[in-house]
Image (cartoon, helix red, strand yellow):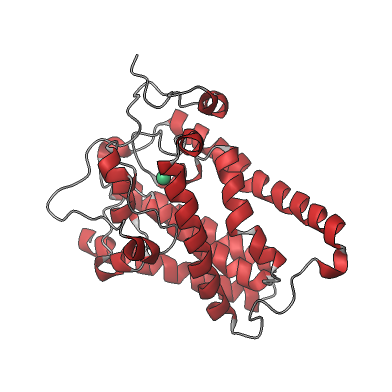
Amino acid sequence: MSQLVRYGAYPFVLALGLALHFLLLENQFGVQVAAYGPVLVGALAIAGLEWIYPYRKQWCADRQELAQDAVYMALIQGVLPKILAVTATLFFAQILGTQQLVVQGWWPTHWPVPLQMLLMMVVADGVRYWLHRWAHEWEPLWRFHAVHHSPHKLYWLNVGRFHPIDKGLQVFLDTLPFILLGVNEEVLGLYIACYAINGFFQHCNIDVRLGILNYLVSGPELHRWHHSMLKTESNHNYGNNLIIWDLIFGSWYLPKERDVQELGLVNREYPTVFLKQMTVPFISGADKHTK
Ligand SMILES: [Zn+2]
């Protein structure tokens, strides 16, 4: 059974999510339900598999971590992007006028939805690649991104642990441009379903193996190295959904003969609770202090 989970969990859960997405759309449930329904089902499936087949038992979350990550998931992944999208849309509407809000003719709206989604994923991942890489290589941005790297373990729910400034930059660069280009709701809905299910997998504590897909998709085997405590290992695998930009720019990293060791920041006393993590990026070198 564990071999089945190891090699089958990723394609099965992703296919289940996609099938559910199209089924919900076909039955007139609306794009929001068709986007977030599969995400919820995918997240629960991943959480269940982690519980039965954890990759590392010591990475299983305790109640306090679950509660903190649930706050992040609700506020930073749920509420914040909605506020930013509405604010930015109103802002651009005021500057450009509602008629010109959508930049006409730049996006291939006549392409089939899955193809538009793939194009969006490739382009958005390219932008996110450089934002993510700069967030590791440029100290002022790293301070905010360090919040995401603070946990000493990886499990499905800590995919949402981002400082609002880090998350705000991501939304501003990888979502809003597509809304302004006129990418329609159906494409965005399909993108959200794939993006979120892959994101839960990226951080999951299941021993899934992607094989040759590790040259296409940014999955958990690659992403664990990205969360290593050692900079020489963690400054790799910046890909959000796809890993192609890491292959192109030389930051793809997957050692064969060993597993990742300690995860997180050098400062093992770095705050972990939500409110403290909101202010800690404003303290110089907080990720490196060893008290
Ligand atoms: Zn990172």
Residue 153 position (above or below residue 24) = above
Q: Position of residue 55 (x, y in %)?
A: 26, 47
Name of the residue lying farthest toward the top: 291
Quadrant hosting residue 266: top left
> Which residue is at a point 39% across and 55% down the rendered structure image?
201
Residue 69 visible in the displayed image: yes
Residue 41 visible in the snapshot = no
Front-most of 251 and 194?
251
Residue at the location (62% across, 59% down)?
175
Q: Position of residue 66 (x, y in %)?
A: 47, 35
Instruction: Specify whether 263 is left or right of 73.
Output: left
Using the image, determine if residue 147 lies above or below residue 79.
above
Front residue (pair 4, 186): 186
Compared across the picture, whether 194 is left or right of 266 comes to right
User: Height in image: 157 above or below 240?
Assistant: above
Query: How many badges with numbers are in the image?
Result: 0
Query: Seen in the image, is 49 located left or right of residue 199?
Result: left
Quadrant in which the C terminus is drawn: top left
Residue 286's spot in the image, x, y percent? Answer: 43, 23
Q: Nearer the viewer, residue 190 or 239?
A: 239
Looking at the figure, which quarter contains the N terminus? bottom left
Q: Residue furthest left?
A: 257
Q: Please state the horizontal and vertical placement of residue 83, each as a whole percent of the image.
A: 72, 47
**Does residue 101 appear left or right of residue 1 in this picture?**
right
Q: Quadrant of ligand 1?
A: top left
